[in-house]
């Protein structure tokens, strides 16, 4: 009897519908990973198909076996060690105090070159003396001694993917001096790397999760000027000033609308007046465009007129913290191209509501104007509206799960439907007099 | 899968709760239905977001539940890693030796596997060439025996193929074995396990904790649910194998609920073939002495869209 039941279950489990296609949306069956041969050839391995799931647990052994196989596969995949081939191993050294010249170089010599003398990001905390490999094209900063300094998120990401071996500095672990020190430096564990790097220089776990999520899929992510949350307080006064000037920035604004009304009243050829008579005015109307134009009395917001704001005027967390570059964008670390996307990171446990209009407004105005361009955009109205004139991406992190939302400043007022040529379907009806006239 | 020693230390890093030990992760999943969210990169497949690796991020609710059960404790990792400074010379050397032996073991495994693969490939090649030669011979025998010159030409082919099987693996195998560098997942060892006086107090939890604990003790697997429009997604079994049944939202007993919220939740849940589960403790934080008391008083309601 039991066998019969099991057969029935086996039968139904295959029928599971596959509606969703986004694999990362749900927990995946790690058994699928077994088909990939990691240690031999990772280049040829492609992603497995979505696993099939059951509706609910039942007391069959078959189900228990499958579950334990899944768990075992997950265990194996997660237990896989991070190994470094001695020939390609890249070693970094943790510098808890931030960038410093190599030992043996006098600090006074260095200070001649201004500032801390190194011209490096003050949050950089891992030094790679002999950089090799492709990762340093989009990560890290080189100093005068050709060493690469990595920011905490960059270092942590490289450790995590098994591409970097970070060592504790000998000052901390206190190894013996001389050549012995090199041999006795202790490799940092993943746990130690998290403990040392998360929380350092404004790097929250949420920001790091977003950073790695994008890096893994090939995007380059670099810190934006708005990275530092603490700069919010210092610019408080300026912030208020901007709030005061707010109405002016809203497109035509109040003044604009009023002047429009005045122009309209003084227009000698216009017989229209809302106080006395129809809004469109009495008289001869020779085409619809004029009529519609007269009817357009409600002021609207023109995003292309809004002035740009300093990124620091925004309110954290609704502030751009990462500039994202597509894999196809060539990146030169010294002369960065404009970013393809701008991302603000929001932690759901700290910010439980959606942003207010003011927060969205300032956030959008802190990004440069990005009007819809290209032949396709010209042609397609809805793509144009969706693209908007400014845009920003919100990465909402809910306990490690990231959802991306794109906010764009759409300009419905700019799309005057009565002025656009009717689509080809209308012109097929040949006898349409109105269309021809236009 | 070894059972870890209890209580399991949960790393508290910059306000978040993380697990780095694979044994702890599997154990908690199997025995306590705690899944967490994997946020790390799998080093063997680093260019995708479908399968992720350690560390495992725990919700404060999950960490709290484990601490209340006495299964886990919270360790301030930044403080604990200050212990690297006071590591004894002896321990350090021993730890490095251990890592080196691990590295050697790994490189031996790798080279073994490489050899196996090579042998397999060569065997295949060998079989192929042998089959070819056999065919050629048969053909020739069929055709004529009167062309000894061509046979002499064919002969070397037969000899060349098997040769590599004897020479290449031998020459590589005896080569020096270098230890692979290893990045361990956890820092224990070399750090000593922190004693109970160094443990942090149980995590602060949001108001929804009682509902979370209530469902968890009834065997549900819960994971963060904002992506699906709720607080927690409740699975009847391990999410590895089962689809979720409920979209869960917690509410305080005296808290007003917007009717539209219920309608939205009900429609959303029904749309994805899940129930919309609304619940919460009957006692507020002022009325109850402890969270445990609140957990006792939880009631739950499931809302489904009948769709007439």
Image (tube, rainbow, N blue to C red):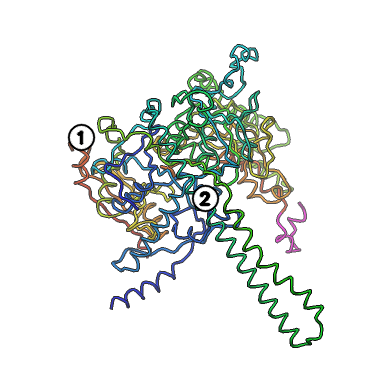
| Above/below status of B259 relative to B165 | above
Residue occupying the point 74% across, 70% down = B156
Q: Which element is circle 1 on? A: loop
Q: Residue at x 31, y 45 (%)?
A: B257
Which residue is disc 2 drawn over?
Answer: B44
Q: Which chain contains the residue that carries disc 1?
A: B
Could you tell me which residue is drawn at 52 percent across and 56 percent down?
B112
Q: Residues within 10 Å of mark 1 (few under 14, many from 20)?
A: few
Query: Residue B305 at what x, y percent from top left?
Result: 36, 60
Q: Quadrant of residue A254?
A: top right
Q: Are marks 2 and 1 on the same chain?
A: yes
Question: Would residue A62 be found to the left or right of residue A185 on screen?
Answer: left
**Near-viewer residue (B236 or A292):** B236
Q: Is residue B274 magenta?
A: no
Q: CA distance from mark 2 to mark 1?
A: 50 Å
Is residue A432 covered in magenta? yes
**Quick one: label 2 or label 1, which is nearer the N terminus?**
2
Position of residue B206 in the picture relative to residue A48 (left or right): left
Among the 4 quarters of the image, the one containing residue B190? top left
Please provide percent x and percent y for residue A196.
Answer: 45, 31
Front-lying residue, A202 or A65: A65
Query: At which x and y percent is residue A181?
Result: 50, 27
Q: Residues within 10 Å of mark 2 (few under 14, many from 20)?
A: many
Q: Disc 1 designates what residue? A: B286
- Is residue A302 among the parts visible in the rendering? no
Q: Position of residue A27 (x, y in %)?
A: 43, 54
Image quadrant where one finds the C terminus of chain B: bottom left
For the record, the magenta segment spans A422-438
């Amino acid at each position: 009897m039991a066998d019969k039941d099991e057969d029935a279950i086996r039968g139904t489990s295959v029928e599971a519908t596959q509606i969703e296609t986004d694999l990362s949306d749900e927990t995946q069956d790690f058994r699928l990973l077994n088909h990939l041969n990691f240690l031999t050839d990772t280049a040829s391995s492609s992603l497995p198909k979505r696993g099939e799931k059951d509706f609910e647990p039942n007391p069959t052994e078959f189900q228990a076996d499958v579950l334990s196989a899944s768990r075992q596969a997950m265990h194996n995949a997660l237990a896989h060690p991070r190994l470094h081939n001695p020939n390609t191993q890249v070693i970094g050294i943790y510098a808890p105090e931030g960038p410093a010249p190599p030992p043996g170089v006098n600090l006074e010599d260095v200070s001649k070159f201004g500032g801390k003398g190194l011209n490096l990001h003050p949050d950089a905390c891992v030094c790679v003396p002999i950089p090799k490999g492709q990762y340093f094209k989009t990560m890290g900063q080189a100093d005068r001694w050709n060493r690469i300094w990595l920011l905490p998120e960059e270092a942590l990401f490289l450790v995590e993917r098994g591409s970097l071996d970070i060592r504790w500095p000998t000052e901390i672990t206190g190894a013996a001096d001389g050549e012995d020190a090199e041999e006795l430096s202790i490799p940092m564990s993943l746990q130690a790397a998290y403990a040392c790097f998360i929380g350092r220089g404004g790097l929250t776990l949420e920001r790091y999760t977003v950073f790695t999520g994008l890096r893994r899929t090939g995007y380059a992510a670099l810190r934006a000027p708005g990275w530092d949350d603490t700069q919010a307080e210092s610019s408080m006064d300026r912030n208020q000033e901007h709030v005061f000037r707010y109405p002016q920035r809203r497109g035509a604004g109040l003044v604009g609308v009023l002047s429009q009304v005045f122009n309209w009243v003084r227009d000698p050829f216009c017989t229209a007046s809302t106080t006395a008579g129809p809004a469109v005015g009495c008289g001869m109307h020779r085409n619809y465009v004029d009529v519609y134009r007269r009817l357009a009395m409600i002021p609207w917001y023109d995003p292309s007129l809004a002035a740009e704001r300093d990124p620091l005027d925004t309110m954290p967390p609704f502030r751009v913290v990462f500039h994202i570059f597509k894999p196809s964008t060539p990146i030169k670390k010294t002369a960065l191209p404009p970013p393809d996307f701008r991302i603000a990171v929001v932690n759901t446990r700290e910010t439980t509501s959606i942003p207010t209009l003011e927060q969205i407004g300032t956030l959008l105005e802190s990004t440069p104007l990005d009007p819809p361009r290209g032949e396709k955009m010209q042609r397609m109205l809805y793509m144009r509206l969706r693209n908007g004139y400014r845009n920003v991406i919100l990465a909402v992190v809910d306990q490690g799960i990231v959802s991306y939302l794109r906010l764009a400043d759409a300009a419905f007022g700019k799309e005057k439907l009565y002025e656009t040529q009717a689509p080809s379907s209308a012109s097929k009806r040949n006898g349409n007099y109105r269309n021809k006239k236009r | 899968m070894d059972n870890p020693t209890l209580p399991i230390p949960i790393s508290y890093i910059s306000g978040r709760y993380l697990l780095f030990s694979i044994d702890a992760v599997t154990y908690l999943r199997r025995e306590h239905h705690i899944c967490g969210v994997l946020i790390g990169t799998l080093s063997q497949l680093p260019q995708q977001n479908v399968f992720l690796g350690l560390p495992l991020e725990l919700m404060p609710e999950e960490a709290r539940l484990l601490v209340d059960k006495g299964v886990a404790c919270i360790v301030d990792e930044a403080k604990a890693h200050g212990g690297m400074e006071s590591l004894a010379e002896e321990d350090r050397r021993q730890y490095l030796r251990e890592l080196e032996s691990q590295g050697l073991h790994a490189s031996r495994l790798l080279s073994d596997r490489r050899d196996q693969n090579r042998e397999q490939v060569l065997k295949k090649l060998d079989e192929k060439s042998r089959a070819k030669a056999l065919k050629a011979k048969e053909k020739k025998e069929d055709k004529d025996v009167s062309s000894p010159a061509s046979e002499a030409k064919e002969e070397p082919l037969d000899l060349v193929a098997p040769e590599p099987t004897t020479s290449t693996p031998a020459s590589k195998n005896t080569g020096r074995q270098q230890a692979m560098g290893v990045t361990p997942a956890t820092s224990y060892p070399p750090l000593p396990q922190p004693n109970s006086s160094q443990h942090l107090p149980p995590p602060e939890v949001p108001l929804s904790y009682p509902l979370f604990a209530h469902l968890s003790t009834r065997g549900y697997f819960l994971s963060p649910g904002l992506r699906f429009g709720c607080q927690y997604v409740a699975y009847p079994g391990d999410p590895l194998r089962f689809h979720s049944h409920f979209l869960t939202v917690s509410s305080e007993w005296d808290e007003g609920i917007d009717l539209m919220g219920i309608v939205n939740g009900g429609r959303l849940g029904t749309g994805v073939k899940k129930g919309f589960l609304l619940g919460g403790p009957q006692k507020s934080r002022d009325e109850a002495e402890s969270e445990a008391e609140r957990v006792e008083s939880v009631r739950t309601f499931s809302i489904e869209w009948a769709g007439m």
